[in-house]
Amino acid sequence: MVLIFALLAAAFDASVGCVAVSREKPGRPADQQMFARNVHVEVLGSNGARDCPLPWLDSFCMRSFTGSSAFDATLPVAEGHLEAGFQVDLTALQAGMEDWMTRKFGRGGAVRLRLTEAERLVPSK
């Protein structure tokens, strides 16, 4: 399923000149990214900010669960990091992610996130 999504997403985002590669290498060079933008996603809590867990990002970014086409051009690549196409509005993405994660993972409380466009690549681990 991930491979099919990756191939479709690569074709969709080809108009901005991105190159499709495996998501198994989160620290890959900029010329090997699926989408043009790197987004850092943090969960804000009483103990401070922490990277959003990769399973949470995966859950949101799978359209079959969210039913929203607005975020088709997103791809989780590591804990707290996803790639996004230029057509993805980060404010709308944050609102959608907070709503989805509150319902799915909030345990009765609101999930608050901070999304920032990363200036540099995700370090390889």
Image (cartoon, rainbow, N blue to C red):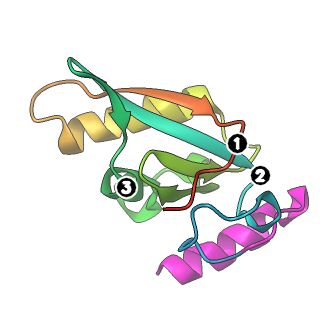
Span highlighted in magenta in the image? 1-20
Mark toward the start of the polypeptide (3 vs 1) = 3
Q: CA distance from mark 1 to mark 2?
A: 12 Å
Front one among 99 and 20: 20
Main SS of the magenta segment? helix
Q: Nearer the viewer, residue 105 or 69?
A: 105
Q: Is residue 106 highlighted in magenta?
A: no
Q: Is 9 inside the magenta-drawn segment?
A: yes
Circle 2 is placed at which residue position? 36
What residue appears at the point 41 percent right and 38 percent down from the top-left corner? 97
The answer to whether mark 2 and mark 3 are in CB contact below 8 A is: no
Where residue 54 sits in the image (x, y, percent)?
Answer: 37, 55
Q: Residue at x 53, y 36 (%)?
A: 93
| Disc 1 to disc 2: CB gap under 8 Å | no
User: Disc 3 marks which residue?
Assistant: 54
What residue type is disc 1 on? Arg
**Depth check: 29 or 112 in front?**
29
